[in-house]
Image (cartoon, rainbow, N blue to C red):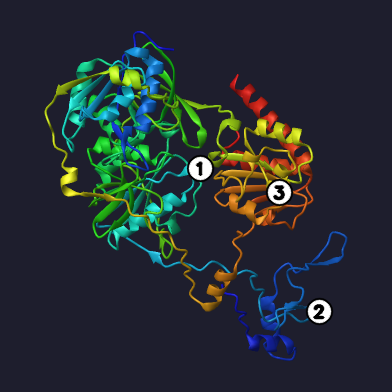
Amino acid sequence: MTDIIRRDPRAEWIARNRLHPLHAVMQAAHTVKEARWMGPNGVIRKSPHAALGFIGPNGIRRIDRSGAQQGGTTRRLGQSQETQLPLHRVDEPAFIIAVVPDMVGGRLSSHDRDLLGLAHHLAGQEGAVLAVVFGEHKETGFDTAGVDRLLQLSGHEYDGYSPEQRVLALRAVESQFLPRHWLLPDSRTGGGELGRRLAAALHERPATRVWQVKDGVCIGRAGSGSEDLTRAVPRLILASAECAEPVSETRHDAIEVMLGEGNTLRSLPRLEDLGPVAVDPALIPMAEAEFILSGGNGVQDWDLFHRAAQTLGATEGASRVAVDDGHMPRHRQVGATGTWVTARVYLAIGISGAVQHLQGIGACDKVIAVNLNAGCDMIKRADLSVIADSSAVLEALIRLVEGYRAGDWKDVA
Amino acid sequence: MADVSLEVITLVSVGAHPTSGRARRAEQDARAVELGLHLAGNRLQLLHAGNPYEEALRGYLGMGIPALHVLEQPKGADALPVLVDYLREASVQVVLTGTQAETGEGSGMLPYLLAEALGWPLVVGLAEVETIEGGSAQVLQALPRGQRRRLRVRLPFVASVDNAAPVARQSAFGPARRGQIEVQEVEVVDDILLSESTLQPSRPRPKRLKVIKAKTAADRFRAATAKASGDGGQILRDVTPEAGAEAIFKLLREEGVIR
């Protein structure tokens, strides 16, 4: 649906002309049911939304009090819908390019999207891109990211850290789909390790830290990064971020495929995952902390703020004002003049959002703001904003988390 | 916590200084040696495959280890088969390596291929060994963003060490001079990679351009003048602090940051 108002002048004219022979018929067609009904006390009730008035030629609602007239146009949608991208369809793929995205936090990262773009570059028109996803995911945009076939491998054997089981599953994918290329992100979040394990298992020599693939030749960093290695494109590519442009102009099927029965073996794990270890969040460098609780001018009670950071298990950050006022040390300052952070979740308490601060949190995934002023820039940036007093919200949050932890602990015991 | 009965071997390589390119002890390998010294004390064995007369190798001896074993190979030879043969005979329980070499291909594949060839489990990004008892070890693995994960792994195992491992001690000149380098002649297996591909000084990577794919002039204008702010998230007004905290808590739980 577009923004352009489609008018039917004839219908409008008939709607205005009560003597027109078609007036009654067209009104009946446009009258919404349940526009008026008898209430329980015998009073006639009218729905103000369903049938009252009509949209005039200027887009303004007009109400005719004579009780007979209805508009000739239907109500149009306020916002324009997203344009539908052309569908790229591969019904009978000549070959398969297999991609194993990292799926950090259950979603495709920008690195994964670059990799899918590279996969499409390699697949061309005939090949299909197969994405292999382990466990549950929250991603809804596989079609626009460029996934032709989606293989989701879920099951408790893939939960947690299970590289050996995953390599077994990928070997099953190898024997079933015979992909022409395997593409994995050369990242520290799992792709680099899984790709190298897979390469060792398949006896393929991978190209690592690849940043360009062109004309059958790939270039990757070698050694400590001061040299480039140029070679023919191998079957297994571990590509670094920004190796190619992500898919942006087409939509894809993302057809679910399954792994054949009996193909997946269960291995006896030689590595046993005993779960994550509590790390003191204050010791994690702020630039690479995952979850930051940041305070600004709107924080009155700094003891409460520190308590909240401890309870939530968050690394502390601060805006420049808080640092200048002496509430927080200088190395905790977030922003262009402090540290550029890469947190996945950034909880900003009483920060209005100066440009320098917003630059510093540019790489953050989810921003939550608690502020009294609903018009500040931080609220515009945030994914979730709460317009309330920061101290009260922090206290409530501490109570919630403590309650959750206590309940959790009881469940385990 | 040096363990008297534990046999640990650390594989070392010759590194390159990031700025000058001069040969030095490799950063991650030195950390692996440090970790090995924590585990086995002076009984730590060092193994290198390559040129035994390289002066930078003495940097490892200077960390307090009396001897370094070298499998002599020319430049460009494949180190994997000779290392596998040596480790099969060596009856070690823990093999420590760096994550990737600082010179040559530096693909980081060596620990993976070693583990595959030996049939041993592999721990990637070993940060700390907590306990070793009853044929298995409890170790901490370094994850991105400063996180740690506890693993139990069967002995013997291969482990690679990255920058989360303890910082290597300084190398002392006297022990470095006094240390013995034992040379062993081995069969030379050529690596075919460098005969069919080329190493060049790295080119700076092209910066990604922000391409605006607007079809109409109005869209291009909007893209050029629009503020970088997103489409705006959910805003909760006039809510009690409890309700606001509830919404925040829900999001934090969904993102998995509350543990």
Identify the residue at horizontal 62%, vertical 85% (top origin). A8
Residue A256 appears in view: yes
Residue B101 appears in view: no
Q: Quadrant of residue A217?
A: bottom left
Q: What is the spatial separation of the Cα atoms under label 1 and label 2, in whole angstroms?
A: 57 Å
Q: What is the spatial separation of the Cα atoms under label 3 and label 1, in whole angstroms?
A: 26 Å
Mark 2 lies on residue? A67
Q: What is the spatial separation of the Cα atoms under label 3 and label 2, in whole angstroms?
A: 53 Å
Q: Quadrant of residue B58?
A: top left
Q: Residues within 10 Å of mark 2 (few under 14, many from 20)?
A: few
Identify the residue at horizontal 37%, vertical 55% (top origin). B205
Q: Residues within 10 Å of mark 3 (few under 14, many from 20)?
A: many
- Report the chain holding disc 3: A
Image position of A5 with respect to A310: above or below? below
Mark 3 lies on residue? A351
Mark 1 lies on residue? A105
Image position of A53 with respect to A196: above or below? below
Q: Which mark is residue B78?
A: none
The mark that comes first in sequence, 3 or 1, is 1
Please provide percent x and percent y for residue A84. Answer: 48, 67
Q: Amino acid type of disc 1?
A: Gly
